[in-house]
Amino acid sequence: MKNITKWFLFMSLWMGTACDSLLNIDPEFTQDAENFFNTKEDFDRAIIGVYDMMQPAYLNIWIGEIASDNSIAGGESVNDTRGLHEIENMTHGGVNEELRAVMRVNYTGIARANYIFENQDKIDFEGKELILAEAKFMRAYFYFNLVTYFGDMPLIVDRRVSINEIPNTPRTPKAEIYAQIESDLEDAVAVLPAAAGEVGRLTTGAAMALLGKVLLYQQKYTEASTVLGNLIDNNPGGYALFDDYSTLFYAANENVSEDVFTVQFSGLQGGDYGCLICLNGNAAVGFQGIRQYTGPFYADGNAYNLPTQDLYDAFVDGDLRRDATVLNLDEFIAAQPNSDEITYGIGAGGHTGFFNNKYIKRQGEIGLPDDDLTSPLNYRVIRWADVLLMAAEAFQQSGNDGRARTELNKVRARVDMPAINSSGDALYQAILEERRFELSGEGYRFFDLVRTGQAADNISGFVVGKNELFPIPQVEIDLAGGNWSQNPGY
């Protein structure tokens, strides 16, 4: 994290890194509880190890966009990250490296949090309650990712699990997982500070926002409207919409009033192409850059996660969010005084002419070599506009159209779009459309379409009753002795 000392605590319930076996119980650099958790500094380093597992955010950005109507996979060829191309085409199955990485990363984060709770009573010190609250928040975040992707998953709380237990650890019904997530977040809300003492640390506002999102995903609209309404009305973090949407995603405008829950990155390399989750930088940015580009403002990249014509055309004339979200490369080049000197390449993995203009490599925003891997651009997991739109949806679905319009129109006013005055289903659809205009390129679209029952109408190849969830990685089913059932349809 940028302003939190990084310390790699390699310990696992399952897997140490994406390059290791999922069931690696004794990875390199493991430090056992007998000679650890004996000082406050040990707990401080351990909680940084949990924070560290939020950094593979590129997976959510890629899958949440590529699985939807917003983007195609792109890249050098269809064999370059084949799993993303399968997800784009809705042909993904139980053998998919990107989906396996999602499972491994999130369970590693859970393992690190559980290791702290397993040893929480070894010593007492000032500030321990805050560390435990941070660990509960992140455990809830990791489990929320898992249940959103895969549905029922094994639920393990406050302890590690030995390799011998894996075959006998069943998938827990998602309702029970959601109950644990809600409990962890409610505890975090009660303890986390309104303002972080260090940039990148979690706050009560972040916990309230994530809790509201968790409730919304369960269609608990009344409860979600209460939590999100309280967050907006009391505003413990002093949150506000950033004035200039067109530059919101520039590195110079990070950690501003709009940022509620953000994963911090630095320009240091850390890992490499063999271990993207080991990076200190945001891998999505370089991978989403313009292939073999030479010219002003932008820098070359790998042309992943390319926006579609459908997304570009969805924006109405005059909505400045279109160009802030989607870079129309040929139009950009044509507008440059030296346009004939600007060149770029096209990969065989697909080309739309568009690039993700939110998370893209720009000159002056790159880190150390290899700068494809070292972007310091933060990932905004939840920003204030998302809070307002989630609140609008929750209020509308729980019968308060007036409050729903109020929150929706705050978002539209920021970009000088006319106010929405509709009610009922028309208002609901307007809110969902606004989520696409406001949040495209950030990794939410697929999950929004699924949870609102609109995926089959918008995603080519989407099969109802199957593609709402992703498949459990087959290798993990095998490692569990075949005792985990596969998700329907896979």
Image (cartoon, rainbow, N blue to C red):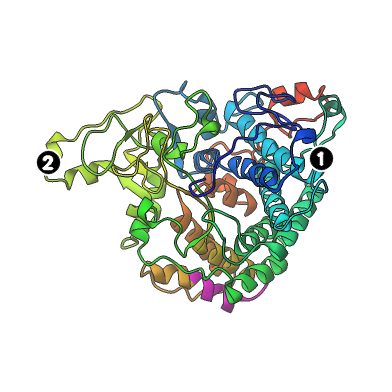
Q: On the rendered structure, is 124 left or right of 85?
A: right
Query: Relative to the observer, which residue lies in front, 301 or 127?
Result: 127
315 over 480 or under it: above or below: below
436 over 59 or under it: above or below: below
Q: On the rendered structure, is 154 left or right of 84?
A: right
- Residue 89 visible? The answer is no
Task: Report the amino acid beneath label 2.
Answer: Asn
Q: How many numbered marks are there?
A: 2
Whether label 1 touches label 2, CB < 8 Å: no
Query: Relative to the observer, which residue lies in front, 420 or 116?
Result: 116
Residue, disc 2: 338
Q: On the rendered structure, is 184 left or right of 461?
A: right
Coordinates of residue 212 in the picture (x, y in percent): 66, 62
Please tell me whether the stretch drawn in magenta is mainly helix, strand or loop: helix
Q: CA distance from mark 1 to mark 2?
A: 61 Å
Q: For numbered disc 1, what is the local secondary structure?
A: loop
* Residue drawn at 36 percent across, 30 percent down: 369
Coordinates of residue 85 in the picture (x, y in percent): 50, 29
* Residue drawn at 79 percent across, 38 percent down: 154
Task: Report the amino acid beneath label 1.
Answer: Arg
Tell me if residue 188 is in the magenta stretch: no
Coordinates of residue 364 in the picture (x, y in percent): 30, 44
Tell me if residue 403 is in the magenta stretch: yes
Q: For numbered disc 2, what is the local secondary structure?
A: loop
Q: Earlier in the sequence, mark 1 or mark 2?
A: 1
- Per the rendered image, the range of residues in magenta is 398-408
Report the disc number at residue 159. Answer: 1
Question: Which label sits in the foreground, 1 or 2?
Answer: 1
